[in-house]
Amino acid sequence: MDAPEGGTLIRAADSAGLADAVRLLSQGRLVGLPTETVYGLACDASNPVAVARVFAAKGRPAFNPLIAHCDSLAMAQQQGVFDNTAARLAEAFWPGPLTLVVPLSASHQVCDLARAGLASVALRVPAHPVMRAVIAGLGRPVAAPSANLSGRVSATSAAHVEADLAGRIDLILDAGSSTHGLESTIIACLGGAPALLRSGAIPADAIRAVLGPDVPLRAARTDPDAPIAPGGLLRHYAPAASLRLNVSVPEPDEAWLAFGPLRSPVPQAAEILSLSETGDLVEAASRLFAFLRSLDARHSRIAVAPIPDTELGEAINDRLRRAATR
Ligand code: TXA
Ligand code: MG
């Protein structure tokens, strides 16, 4: 993966540090940022290459949807559709450690890869002034998973972020220890009763107190790091076309999703799109959803070239296998 040229810099979250963070994010780079819950591994949520870099830096074998952090309710409402329940919870707990999963709105800025292809979006307006100032500076949502390597505990200080991610991100803003030290509580408001997807810094009872006796809170899951969704909550984008994987020579009436240098003679196919002609897995991940949608719109059969099962290739192959076996 493309490591930062100057190594990972840690600096104080003063105005110069904030300006640096905003500049790097707008260039598609990664920054470790403090929030009141845990430190986040932040990127521009609208930039699929930046989001692909986040997945590469975390070393996750699958694309998990990320939380889009907003500086205000107005920015959040530009990304998602709030029903009455979502609006009440946002009013009661934002800014703060509550994440709301809501249907995606037409005016959203959160790219497909950041949502792992879901038609919903996870939104949070954090209370931490540093995080909010950086989002405001960028002017659009910041996607950020917890700033730890996959399988490790969440980072609650700049030193923790450095221990896991040094050499993989460009900058860490140090604002001391996170107040809560526990991730945000995640509630899905997707129609019907709201569902608790992850317990976190706001106790379920505090949520119930705001919802009142007439709105039950469904308990959806218990594992703190991987929401398992009730009844189709996590329905990912799946192409209508059939998908054939590990195809080096497509059939002439198939569209071909290629990877790596095209050998000559170029295979006969209905259409060819290359995820990355240079064999760059970050580039391939950043294009995966857009290219699948694009081919799906024009073809009923898609063949996909073999993709190495290393680094981000693991997550790409995981996603492709799911799309192929519906
Ligand atoms: O406190 C926090 O929430 C921290 C700080 C940095 O904001 N962030 C955090 O992010 O814990 P992460 O990526 O480690 O956990 C986010 C969780 C994931 O388990 C993901 O599956 C879930 O949110 N999630 C994101 N979008 C979702 C969606 N559309 N539907 C269901 N779950 C979603
Ligand atoms: Mg996490």
Image (cartoon, rainbow, N blue to C red):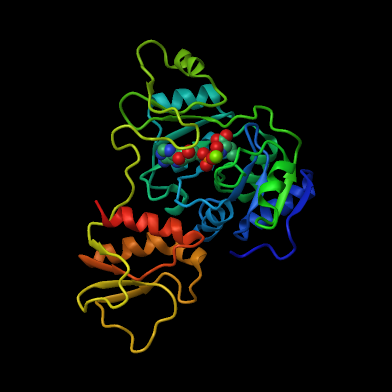
Residue at x 39%, y 20% (from the top left corner)? 217
Residue at x 62%, y 57% (from the top left corner)? 26
| Image coords of residue 119 (percent x, y) | 35, 45
Instruction: Give the quarter of the figure containing the N terminus.
Output: bottom right
Count of labels in the image: 0
Q: Along the horizontal axis of the image, is 12 left or right of 164?
A: right
| Image coords of residue 86 (percent x, y) | 43, 28
Residue at x 68%, y 45% (from the top left corner)? 161
Q: Nearer the viewer, residue 279 or 188?
A: 279
| Image coords of residue 273 (percent x, y) | 36, 73
| Residue 125 at least partly seen | no
Residue at x 44%, y 76% (from the top left corner)? 260
Q: Which residue lies furthest to the bottom in this view?
A: 265
Snapshot quadrant of residue 96: top right
| Image coords of residue 87 (percent x, y) | 44, 27
* 6 in relation to 172, above or below: below
Q: Nearer the viewer, residue 222 or 43?
A: 222
| Residue 30 at least partly seen | yes
* Picture quarter with ligand 2: top right
Q: Along the horizontal axis of the image, is 74 left or right of 293?
A: right
Q: Nearer the viewer, residue 59 or 240?
A: 59
